[in-house]
Image (tube, rainbow, N blue to C red):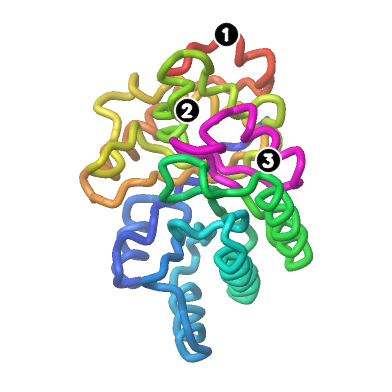
Amino acid sequence: MIPSPKLALCNFIDNSTLLRQFALSHGFDGVDWTFSPANLPRTRMEERTLAKTISSLHPLEVRYHCFFTNTDLGDLNVEKAKDATRLFHHLCRLVSRLGGSRITVHVGLGRNSSSGLSWQRTIEGLADLTHLAGDLGLSLCVENLARGWTSHPDLFEKFLRKTGCWATLDIGHARGSAVVRSRSNRVEDFVLPHPERFLNAHVYHEETMEGHLPPATLTDIENRLRLLRRLPSCDWWVLELREERALLQTLDMVREFLSSEPLSADIRGAANQLCIS
């Protein structure tokens, strides 16, 4: 039996005391802490301050998410690739020192296509980063994007297979990928044939130029939630919305779904019965 997932929110409130109060008052289980250039600690003092902030969020669980655009291990520019490698190695070590266990990264974030990236260098860099993370007690997860290599289920599968990394399924990105919109692929194709490698999910309806949008009704995301529910290791659902009303609206729908959805762990058999919206 797959247990109900933990429901997490982003660190969308700058004040950690208010973030903790908000999360606990609405029954969230954890915080998905996003690192970006704006909040990355640069000194030992800043790192100690961050450690105290993370500790103050107890009893909420904290997992980590990296948001660094145009920062790729496989950049064709050798110096940029080296800079990205140093950054992600530093982030893994930082998360380990913070007591974390999961860290999500991207391939091609901020790019409209994968031009400017080396496939082989990306594979080698991800494999090396996955190995480092493992030595530090972390599971490194790669998130699917709406554009680029990870927006194609067959290429996303190759990343998981060739690098040994884990995965985060973003159901909004999956819905918005060109191959799903053209109906040449289905959302469930992202999780086959490695459903056991998905540890986290990002939950919202769709991504637009204005950002992430919540579902208007449960029907908007119900089939995609049903798919997540069948992933045996995906126990962390991040409601990836940064506006309070949209977040709570989505929280109500997710809870409605979890309270009524019968569980089936047979993802491979069930996938053929789903028509994912």
Identify the amino acid type marked 1: Gln
- Asked which secondary structure carries label 2, the reply is helix
Please give the residue where the numbered disc 1 appears in the rendered image: 273
Identity of the residue drawn at 59% across and 28% down? 153
Rendered image: mark on residue 225: 2
| Residue ID for mark 3 | 159
Residue 78 position in % (x across, y down): 62, 64
Residue 139 % position (x, y): 68, 55
Does the magenta-highlighted stretch encompass residue 123?
no
The residue under the point 33% across, 64% down is 19
Q: Amino acid at mark 2?
A: Leu
Residue 162 within the segment the image draws in magenta: yes
Please identify the quadrant where the N terminus is shown.
top right
Specify whether residue 69 is in view: yes
Q: Is 191 displayed left or right of 213 in the figure?
A: right
- In the rendered image, residue 5, in percent from the top left (x then y), is placed at 54, 40
Return the mark for residue 78. Answer: none
**Neighbour class for label 3 at 10 Å: few (<14), some, many (≥20)?**
many
Stretch in magenta: 142-169
Tag 3, which secondary structure? helix
Identity, as a three-letter code, of the amino acid under mark 3: Phe
The answer, for residue 95, to whether it is visible in the render is: no
Residue 88 in the image, given as x and y percentages of width and height: 60, 66
